[in-house]
Amino acid sequence: MLHIKSIPAFNDNYIWLIQNSDRRCAVVDPGDAAPVLAYLSQHDLTLEAILITHHHHDHIGGVPELVRQYPNVDVVGPSQEPIPTLTHPVDAGDQIELFDERFMVLGLPGHTLGHIGYVGDGKLFCGDVLFSAGCGRVFEGTMEQMFTSLSKLVALPEETEVYCAHEYTASNVAFAMAVEPDNEQLQIYRDEVIRLRGQGYATLPSTVRREKWINPFLRTQEPSVMKSVANRTPQTDALSIFTALREWKNEF
């Protein structure tokens, strides 16, 4: 059983730290080395692996310094993206072993072309693809790629814990409420998010089950979601609804 801790970085990034029982650990998407090094030193942990989901600087900026301090660290990341520090390039369908747990590499293009996620031990590390109540912007890929990537994630077991890389939940919930003001599950979640953030707590991890109930980007065939974008697209297929939602969110 792996234990997950969040290390806050920048304004709203989370660097996820995966720890096993004998003080070895891995980190996911370390955009900044300083908070990671401070945490490792404070808790007397040894860094064995770095998992990277995509090449954006706020996800890889800390890697060179971590490699300098831990020269034997295994740097796992997408083979299709320009990340100079990789020691262990992976592709969709590959598996990696992490502290006796097996993680599958998922291809999740859309936000970036080579974006990947890692799923294992009932946990999903999905970078900037799925957020709680939202999804990532489509920077390099197509709307269709992003929609397909999200479809892969919504097909995971419902109890899967979702560890995304940003604390965007409050603003995502505000948008979701604009899309589905009458969604009771969403209203309950909004109140919980306001309480958690007010007390300085993270809203993550979420779960696949929760996201199915409250995330408009995963609810493209719900009548309430389709109705809310009817003035933005004449089409009713899931991809068109998703595209209309994402474009609306871009300007929200």
Image (cartoon, helix red, strand yellow):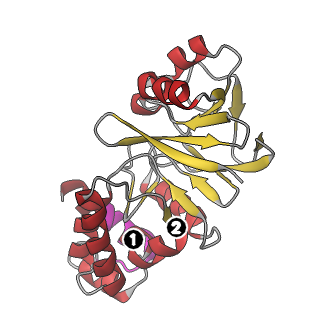
The answer to which quarter of the image holds residue 181 is bottom left
Kindly report the secondary structure that dominates the magenta region of the rendered protein.
helix
User: From the viewer's perspective, is residue 107 above or below residue 212?
Assistant: above
User: From the viewer's perspective, is residue 165 above or below residue 86?
Assistant: below
Residue 229 visible from this viewpoint: no
In this rendering, position of residue 164 left or right of residue 97 = left
User: From the viewer's perspective, is residue 144 above or below residue 192?
Assistant: above
Tag shown at residue 170: none
The amino acid pointed to by label 1 is Asn
Of label 1 and label 2, which has the lower sequence position?
2
Judging by the rendered image, the residue that carries numbered circle 1 is 215
Secondary structure beneath label 1:
loop
User: From the viewer's perspective, is residue 193 above or below residue 83?
Assistant: below
Which residue shows up at 47% across the image and 74% down it?
A: 210
Mark 1 surroundings: few (<14), some (14-19) or many (≥20) residues within 10 A: many
The image shows residue 84 at horizontal and vertical percentages of 57, 18
Judging by the rendered image, the residue that carries numbered circle 2 is 207
The image shows residue 243 at horizontal and vertical percentages of 36, 64
Quadrant of the drawing holding the N terminus? bottom right
Secondary structure beneath label 2:
strand
Which residue shows up at 31% across the image and 85% down it?
A: 183
Which residue shows up at 68% across the image and 22% down it?
A: 73
Asked if residue 238 is among those painted magenta in the image, a careful observer would answer: yes
Question: Which of the pair 13/25 is nearer the observer?
Answer: 25
Q: CA distance from mark 1 to mark 2?
A: 11 Å
Span shown in magenta? 234-246
Quadrant of the drawing holding the C terminus? bottom left
Asked if residue 27 is among those painted magenta in the image, a careful observer would answer: no
Question: Which of the pair 235/245 is nearer the observer?
Answer: 245
